[in-house]
Image: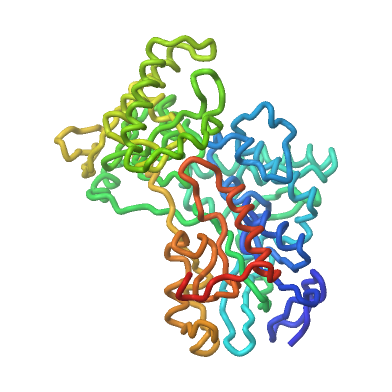
Amino acid sequence: MEILDGMGWSGTRSEPKVVETAAGKKSVCVIGAGASGLTVIKEVTSLGHTAMCFEENCRIGGVYTKSYDRTMLTTSSLLTAYSDYSDGQEDRPKFWSDEEYLRYLDGFASEFELYERVAFRSSVRSVTKCGKTGKWLVTVALGGSYTWPHRSTFLVGKRVSAEARERAAKTGAAVLKEFYEKAAAQGFEAVKSSFVYEYVDHVTGETRTMDPSDAARAEVQTFAFDSVAVCTGTNTWASLPKFEGQDEFVAAGGTIVHSENYKKPEIFKGQRVLVVGAGESGSDICNEIAEEADKVAIAVRGKHGHLIPRKQADGRVTDLNTNRCRYSNPYVLGDWVGYVNQMAKKFVAKYGGGKHVDQSERAVLQKIGELNMSQGTSAFSKFGCKNEGFVTAMVTKGAELHRDTFVLKPHKAVFADGSEFVADAVVACTGYKNAFPMFDDASVRDDVVCAASGATVKDLNTCYGKNPRKLYKQIFCPLFPSGELAFFGFARPAFGSIPPTAEMQSRFYALVLDGHITLPDTKDM
């Protein structure tokens, strides 16, 4: 079995490569180079462990490498930034655009020399556990993954030259124009998996070619690690339900698209659009489409998330409007406290002053209070929606809200209360599902895969990722009390940000690997 020296990638393909690490330290496979994956790399290497990261995309950034054109984060810069890397504007928190956040991540990766530990365009095909050696065998297709062009593809890092930066901007403008023209003519699904284009590497500044056929030529290699950190995120695999009557709707000329494939509102110009779902992305998308469409309706099943605007009436970012006193109220009084709070906010929005708020914003804040009160929710009883977009669409653009199930018919949606909405298109903002295909077809070596817990192949497949929030500390698979299988980026605060949460989890994980923290046994986890 060949030893992998340092971060080299060369060697034979017949045997797994054991990733070498310092005495007493662990080798860690990090899957995904989004916000969570980057902080895992940083924290484990800071304690002397070896980390190798595999990222399918050609750049860092995770979910923000495929976001729609006007994406704005729903948590402020102050509560999204890592604790050890400042944007220098703590006294002026704002809501970053996706491109601003990608630049922040690039600065973080450059500052802590993380790029050297990431293999881009590399897809993890399987992760297996060897019962004899105790190693995790990770099979990777190196360098052949394909991603369709996105604005972020041409957003180069701070390391590249001015010439490469200019080249990236020109290349990106031409490529994106051609891509969207072909998508409009041939269909997005057909084009996004077959389009060949050039891009500028965001780390080196070199011009490269992205070709779907590269996957067939990729080198497939298996590496042996001591631990695996899964950082694939919650927004990777779209969840698109089968709507009742959708075949009739589509046959009559209607279109149905998942928000994953939504990029700009102009494609819905002059149409009547039904937006299904009012989460944070759905709320933004609804408001964008309402600017171009003839009419928009929002469909939610029952209660939408408890609405919190990005900014307060005084212009401050909302996620800083918190204190321990607020969260020390008895849980049973949560809804009552929330109701009084909403009533007060509604009153202030209607009658109060505030130089930062114009009349339309005041009407939106008032409507938020009305909607929260009408469904009887509070921050204590309902997951939050830190986005007032669909409310803005209702107040300023005449969007309709339907809290009912619906059936699609030719050219329309019919709701359970009997009301109808004539529709040309349906945009499904129905979220994503947790899925970990790298484990699905893994042939685990030997039946008993963890002597400490007695875990079998069947137990292992059950543990893998069906609901990461049920893991110990929302990180560790209980079948491995040594902490060798960990998940990051799945612990989502009700009103907060994932990256700093993942940062704290990463530090805990690094201390477990280092032996400073000992996890409970399987039954106690």
Q: Is residue 427 left or right of residue 208?
A: left
Q: Which residue is drawn at 45% across and 75% down?
A: 523
Quadrant in which residue 425 is drawn: top left
Q: In which quarter of the image is the N terminus?
A: bottom right
**Vertical placement of 472 versus 287: above or below?**
below
Give the answer, above or below, for where 278 lies relative to 398: below
Question: Is 270 or 381 nearer to us in this picture?
Answer: 381
In this view, 147 is above or below 48: above
Pinpoint residue 519: horizontal percent, then vertical percent. Answer: 57, 70
Q: Which colour scheme is used?
A: rainbow
Q: In this view, does 100 lie to the left or right of 127?
A: right
The front one of 256 and 430 is 430
Q: Where is residue 290 in the image (x, y as percent from the top left)?
A: 40, 27
Q: How many marks?
A: 0
Q: Which residue is drawn at 48% across and 53% down?
A: 190
Evaluate whether residue 424 shows in this view.
no
**178 to the left or right of 423:** right
Which image quadrant for residue 232?
bottom right
Q: Can residue 377 be seen in this view?
A: yes
Q: Which residue is drawn at 47% across and 56% down?
A: 237
Quarter of the view holding residue 223:
bottom right
Q: Which of 76 and 512 is in front in this view?
A: 512
Looking at the image, which residue is at 82% across and 76% down?
5
The residue at the far left in this view is: 418
Residue 431: x and y in percent read 42, 49
